[in-house]
Amino acid sequence: MEKIKISIIMPVYNVAQYLRRSVDSVLNQTFNGFELILVDDGSTDSSPSILDDYKKDARVNVIHKENSGSGLSRNTGLSVAKGQFVYFMDPDDWLEGEMLRENYELIREMNPDILLFGSYDHFNNEITSQDLDNEFLQSKKFFLERFPELFKKDVMYTVWNKIYKKSFLLNFNLRFGSERSGQDYVFNIKVYDKVNTMLVNNRKYYHYVIQRKDSATTNFREDMFSLYKHEQIELINFIEKNDINAKDIINDRWYFILNNSWRRALSQKNLRKSNAYTNNILNEYSKNKYIHLKYLTKFKWRIKYLLFFKSHIYRLYKNW
């Protein structure tokens, strides 16, 4: 039996209508020497039976478990992974081309801690992408120097555009947290604190569907601001620990957290409740001076923060 080179770990929860497209895009890869670990996180739709249909493929390992969130499900997959490298994929997205074969050829040659590759974002009927440069960041120094620019390209939050060396993750005991949202963001910040080498491949292989109506990134949760703030604190600690000049990144991220929390609060379709939620956030922002206007990189964000949020015009807005 051929040695497993890459383990693909896919947590699955109630995504039946998207699941076959995602799984088939992996199994259609011509690369030899991979395994696909499908972790059913206590799904209540037809996802479990769909996963079981794939058991006949020798490359597939299906695990059913009680619901605990995608982070702990990824840890479950990692605990049984046999590959030299691991790749974490979402169950509602899909791959194109020879992602595994082409990236493994690069990994075999350069042996990085992480490989980063390009992707496409799908939002409604629009497809966008970020252009990357082919580069090998061969030391911690080079990685930290390049971190701000890579972060600004929106390619550093997610796990599905990266392949990780398994021994690197295990040696530093890098695992996902139990948070119900933002686990990949926090996981990556911990990874970046330990990483020494990163290889960047500018080719695009992954199709990411942004904000399904029923996804965890669109629905309102009472604790969503706390989760966002936890992510932000991890980012700030990493930036300060490594002496990275990134006041613009920190301020832009604070603005994103405020704006996204307000938008998701509106999904309650109760203006009184959404305004109270947003007002509590704004009070914390004012008390702690989270945002400094001069560091916000977009003029329209400065205007919206001053005239829409600080002046409380948001209280009059509803989108239903």
Image: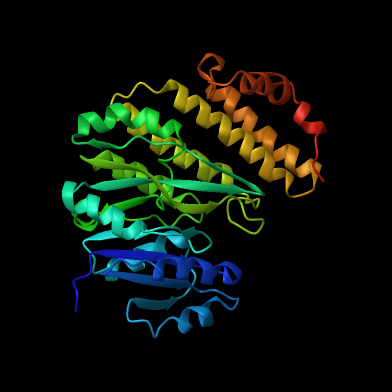
Give residue 189's quadrant in the image.
Answer: top left
- Where residue 172 appears, as percent x and y from the top left, is 21, 51
**Residue 69 in the figure: left or right of residue 61:** right
What residue sits 38% from the left and 63% below the top?
A: 74
Q: Nearer the viewer, residue 192 or 287?
A: 192
Q: Nearer the viewer, residue 63 or 223?
A: 63
- Which image quadrant for residue 89? bottom left
How has the structure been colored for display?
A: rainbow
Whether residue 79 is visible to the viewer of this picture, yes or no, is yes
Q: Is residue 32 above or below residue 186?
A: below
**What residue lies at 62% left-to-right and 39% top-to-bottom?**
260
Tell me how many marks there are. Answer: 0
205 lies left or right of 259: left
Q: Where 163 falls versus 140 (above or below)?
A: below
Q: Position of residue 320 (x, y in %)?
A: 82, 46
Residue lying at the far top of the rendered structure: 294
Relative to 308, 198 lies left or right = left
Indicate the quadrant containing the N terminus: top left, top right, bottom left or bottom right: bottom left
In the rendered image, the vertical position of residue 72 relative to residue 208, given as above or below? below
Describe residue 318's horizontal placement relative to residue 212 as left or right.
right
Location of residue 141 in the rendering, given as x and y in whole percent from the top left corner: 21, 29
Q: Quadrant of residue 2?
A: bottom left
Q: Position of residue 50 (x, y in %)?
A: 52, 79
Up the image or down, 193 lies above or below 183; here it is above
| Residue at (49% x, 70% y) in the render | 67
Residue 174 visible in the current orientation: no
Q: Residue at x 22, y 57 (%)?
A: 170
